[in-house]
C-alpha cells in the first residue's frame, strides 16, 4: 500500500490546473492521482501514468541581466529555474549551453549569434551611446528552451580613461610576462586573474577576480610574475588603468592556457650500444604535463645526414645501424597537438656501435654456451646422484683383502672371531721381544682395538712399500697365539702395528 | 615443442600490437588515475572533526549497478565518470563554506575536476550523447540527496565530514571505471 501524500497548493482546486513546487527527488519515479470532491462525496481516483520529473520537465528560458560600459556590454546569464537551491536544474549547472542573439537596435539587420557555456559574457568593440539588444535560449543535453524576452541596453558616453589594449601573455625563463599597450604615460595599472572554471558556474564570480602579485599600481605596461603562481590549466587576465582619481573599464580579457606558454625544459638523453642498434633513453627533467612526445635526431658523427624519429615512449631501440660507427643523438620534447610547442634540444650524446657480427655467427655463440651449460649441469647431476646413493644407499663392499670373509657379516670382524676360516692358517709363536710401540703386556682388548682401527687401513697395507717388511716380521713375533687365526686377520694386525711404528 | 613456441610468440606479438594501438587510451587512463589521486588528496583536507559526527551518518544509496563490476562500453564508462565528476564539482562549488574548507584547496580541487572533465569531453565524449539513461539518472538522484543533506544541515562541519567520507569512498569506483577505456 503506497503512502499517498497530499500535494500542497493543489487541494480544493476549482478549475483544472494547479502549480506546485514540492521538494521531491526529481530523478525518481513519481505517481499522481486526482479525484473530484463534492461536499461529502468523492469520485474515484484517476491515476496519472508514473513518470520521472527530470525527464518530463521542459526547460524554461534563461534570465538575462545586462550591464553597459562605453564600448562594451556585459551579459549576465542565469539558468532557468529558481535560484534558492530547490530547482530541478540545480545539479546540472555545469551542463548548460546558451545561445545568444545580439544586435544593434537601430540597424536590426546585423545579428550576432554566440554559443557559450559561460554564465558571464562580454560584447566588445561597440559604439558609444547606442542601444543594443539581446535574447537568449538555454540548452541542456537534448532539452532546448524557447528564447527569452528581448533585453536592451544603452552604452554609455565615452569614458575619459581608456582601458589598456592588446593584452598579451608570454613566458620568459621561469616567469610569465603580461604586457599591454597604453597611450598615456601618467597612469598606473593593475592586473587581475580568474580561474577559467569560474565562468562555467552560475554563482557570482565578480568578486572572484584576484590581484596578481607585483601587478598593482605599476607604471610599466608590463608585469612579471613567477610561473609557480599559475600552475593550473586555464586562466583569464585583465588590466585596468588608473590616474589617481579615475579608473578605466577593464581591458579585454585574455584567456590563457598555461600549457601553451610555460617553458618546457629539454629532456636528458642517454644511450647504450649493441652491435647494430642503439638503445636510447630519454628522460624529461620534470613531469610538467601529462603527455609527452619526443623528437630524436640521429646522425653519424662523420656525415651530417640526420634521421628524425618521433616516439611517445621514453626508451627506444634504433635498429639497422652500421657497426663500429659513432652515432650522435639529440632529443627534444614535443607537446602533442594544439600548439606544437617544443622544448629546446637536449645536449648531444654520442656513442659508438659495437663491432658487428656476420649473420650466422650470432646464433652460434649462445648455442655453444647452452651446450656447455647443459654438459656442466649433467655432470653436476651425476655427482649429486652419486652422493645421494652413497649417503642413503651405501654399497657394503668389503676391502679386497677380506674378500675371503664374504660369507661373514662385517660386524663380526670387530669381535674376536671364534669361527675361523678354513683357509690356510698357521700359528706363529715367538718369545723374542721386538720394537713395538705399545707395552708388551697388551691385553686382548687392546689387540682387538688395533684390529678394529686397522680395518680401514687394510687397503693401505697393500700399497705400502717393502721397507715395512722388517717391521712386519718383528711385529709378527709379538703376536699372541690365541689371537691368530687366518691370513686376513693377521694382515690386519700387522698393518696397524706397522703404521704405528713408522 | 615447436608449436608451443610458435603459440607463445604469436601471443606475445598480439599483446604488443594491441598495446601500441591503444596507447592514447592508456595515457587517458593514466591521466584520469593520477587526477583521481590528486582529487582524493585534496578532498581529505576538510577541517572537520570526524569523531563527533557519528550520529550524522546517512546512507545516500549509491546506484548498485555501478558498484558491481559488469562490462561497460568505454563511452558508457566515460559518461558515468563525467556525471560523477560534474556532480562532485557542483556540490563543492555550491555548498562549500569557508569554515569547513580552505578556499585554495577548494579551487585546486575544482580546477582538477574541471581539467579531468575537459579531457573526457575532448577524447571519448566528443560525440555528445543525446539521451540521459537510467544509470546517469540514478547518479543524479544520489548526488541530489547529498546536496539536500548538506543544505538541510546548513553545511555544518559534521555534515561535510559525512559527505567527504561519502565522496572519497566513490573514487575507487571511478578508478575501476577507467579500466573500461581499453574496451
Image (tube, grey):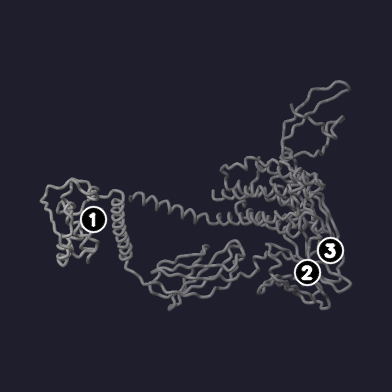
Question: Crowding near pointer 1: few (<14 within 10 Å), some, many (20+)?
Answer: some
Question: Residue A440: percent from the left, percent from the top?
Answer: 22, 60
Say which residue appears at 75% left-offset and 32% top-offset.
A31
Say whether residue A135 is left or right of residue A496. Answer: right
Element type at marker 1?
Answer: helix
Q: Quadrant of residue A480?
A: bottom left
Q: Is residue A279 above or below residue A489?
A: below
Residue furthest out toward the top? A41
Q: CA distance from mark 2 to mark 1?
A: 116 Å
Residue tagged by mark 3?
A: A69
Element type at marker 2?
Answer: strand
For the residue pair A207 and A18, the one nearer the viewer reads as A207
Residue tagged by mark 1?
A: A447
Q: Is residue A374 above or below residue A351?
A: above
> Do the dots labelled 3 and 2 sit on one chain?
yes
Say whether residue A123 is left or right of residue B86. Answer: right
| Res A113 visible | no
Instruction: Say whether marks 3 and 2 touch (CB < 8 Å).
Output: no
For the residue pair A428 and B163, the one nearer the viewer reads as A428
Element type at marker 3?
Answer: loop
Question: Residue A456: percent from the left, percent from the top?
Answer: 24, 56
Q: CA distance from mark 3 to mark 1?
A: 131 Å
Residue tagged by mark 2?
A: A191
Amino acid at each position: 500500500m503506497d503512502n499517498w501524500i497530499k500535494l500542497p497548493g493543489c487541494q480544493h482546486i476549482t478549475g483544472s490546473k494547479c502549480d506546485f513546487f514540492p521538494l521531491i527527488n526529481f530523478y525518481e519515479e513519481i505517481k499522481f492521482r486526482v479525484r473530484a470532491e463534492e461536499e461529502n462525496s468523492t469520485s474515484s481516483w484517476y491515476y496519472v501514468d508514473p513518470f520521472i520529473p527530470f525527464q518530463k520537465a521542459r526547460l524554461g528560458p534563461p534570465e538575462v541581466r545586462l550591464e553597459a560600459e562605453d564600448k562594451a556590454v556585459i551579459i549576465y546569464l542565469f539558468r532557468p529555474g529558481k535560484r534558492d537551491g530547490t530547482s530541478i536544474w540545480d545539479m546540472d549547472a555545469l551542463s548548460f549551453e546558451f545561445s545568444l542573439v545580439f544586435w544593434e537596435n537601430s540597424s536590426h539587420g546585423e545579428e550576432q549569434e554566440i554559443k557559450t557555456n559561460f554564465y558571464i559574457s562580454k560584447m566588445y568593440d561597440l559604439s558609444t551611446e547606442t542601444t543594443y539588444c539581446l535574447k537568449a535560449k538555454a540548452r541542456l543535453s537534448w532539452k532546448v528552451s524557447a528564447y527569452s524576452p528581448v533585453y536592451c541596453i544603452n552604452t554609455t558616453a565615452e569614458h575619459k580613461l581608456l582601458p589598456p589594449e592588446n593584452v598579451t601573455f608570454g613566458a620568459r625563463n621561469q616567469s610569465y610576462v603580461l604586457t599591454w599597450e597604453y597611450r598615456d604615460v601618467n597612469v598606473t595599472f593593475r592586473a587581475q586573474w580568474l580561474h577559467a572554471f569560474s565562468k562555467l558556474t552560475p554563482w557570482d564570480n565578480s568578486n572572484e577576480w584576484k590581484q596578481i602579485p607585483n601587478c598593482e599600481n605599476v607604471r610599466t605596461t608590463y608585469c612579471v610574475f613567477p610561473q609557480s603562481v599559475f600552475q593550473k590549466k586555464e586562466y583569464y587576465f585583465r588590466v585596468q588603468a588608473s590616474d589617481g582619481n579615475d579608473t578605466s573599464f577593464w581591458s579585454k580579457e585574455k584567456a590563457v592556457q598555461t600549457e601553451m606558454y610555460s617553458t618546457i625544459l629539454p629532456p636528458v638523453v642517454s644511450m647504450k650500444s649493441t652491435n647494430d642498434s642503439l638503445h636510447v633513453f630519454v628522460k624529461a627533467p620534470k613531469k610538467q604535463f601529462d603527455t609527452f612526445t619526443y623528437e630524436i635526431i640521429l646522425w653519424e658523427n662523420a656525415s651530417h645526414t640526420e634521421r628524425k624519429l618521433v616516439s611517445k615512449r621514453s626508451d627506444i631501440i634504433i635498429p639497422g645501424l652500421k657497426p663500429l660507427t659513432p652515432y650522435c643523438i639529440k632529443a627534444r620534447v614535443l607537446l602533442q597537438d594544439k600548439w606544437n610547442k617544443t622544448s629546446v634540444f637536449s645536449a648531444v650524446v654520442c656513442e659508438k656501435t659495437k663491432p658487428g657480427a656476420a649473420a650466422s655467427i650470432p646464433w652460434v655463440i649462445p648455442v655453444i654456451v647452452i651446450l656447455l651449460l647443459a654438459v656442466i649441469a649433467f655432470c653436476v647431476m651425476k655427482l649429486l646422484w652419486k652422493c645421494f646413493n652413497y649417503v642413503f644407499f651405501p654399497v657394503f663392499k668389503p676391502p679386497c683383502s677380506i674378500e675371503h670373509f664374504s660369507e661373514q657379516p662385517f660386524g663380526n670382524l670387530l669381535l674376536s672371531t671364534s669361527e675361523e676360516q678354513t683357509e690356510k692358517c698357521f700359528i706363529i709363536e715367538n718369545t723374542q721381544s721386538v720394537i713395538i710401540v705399545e707395552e708388551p703386556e697388551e691385553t686382548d682388548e687392546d689387540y682387538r682395538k688395533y684390529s678394529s682401527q686397522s680395518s680401514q687401513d687394510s687397503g693401505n697395507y697393500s700399497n705400502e712399500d717393502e721397507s715395512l717388511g722388517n717391521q712386519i716380521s718383528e711385529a709378527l713375533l709379538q703376536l699372541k697365539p690365541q689371537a691368530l687365526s687366518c691370513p686376513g686377520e693377521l694382515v690386519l694386525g700387522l698393518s696397524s702395528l706397522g703404521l704405528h711404528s713408522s | 615443442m615447436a608449436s608451443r613456441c610458435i603459440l607463445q610468440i604469436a601471443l606475445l606479438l598480439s599483446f604488443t600490437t594491441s598495446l601500441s594501438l591503444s596507447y592514447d587510451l592508456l595515457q587517458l587512463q593514466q591521466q584520469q588515475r593520477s587526477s583521481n589521486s590528486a582529487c582524493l588528496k585534496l578532498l581529505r583536507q576538510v577541517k572537520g572533526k570526524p569523531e563527533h559526527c557519528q550520529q550524522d551518518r546517512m546512507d545516500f544509496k549509491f546506484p548498485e549497478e555501478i558498484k558491481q563490476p559488469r562490462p561497460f562500453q568505454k563511452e558508457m564508462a566515460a559518461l558515468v565518470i563525467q556525471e560523477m565528476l560534474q556532480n562532485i564539482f557542483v556540490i563543492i562549488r555550491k555548498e562549500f563554506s569557508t569554515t569547513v574548507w580552505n578556499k585554495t584547496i577548494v579551487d585546486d580541487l575544482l580546477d582538477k575536476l574541471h581539467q579531468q572533465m575537459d579531457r573526457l569531453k575532448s577524447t571519448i565524449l566528443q560525440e555528445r550523447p543525446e539521451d540521459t539513461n537510467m544509470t546517469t539518472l540514478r547518479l543524479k538522484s544520489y548526488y541530489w540527496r547529498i546536496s539536500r543533506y548538506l543544505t538541510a544541515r546548513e553545511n555544518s562541519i559534521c555534515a561535510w565530514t559525512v559527505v567527504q567520507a561519502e565522496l572519497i569512498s566513490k573514487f575507487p569506483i571511478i578508478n575501476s571505471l577507467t579500466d573500461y577505456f581499453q574496451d
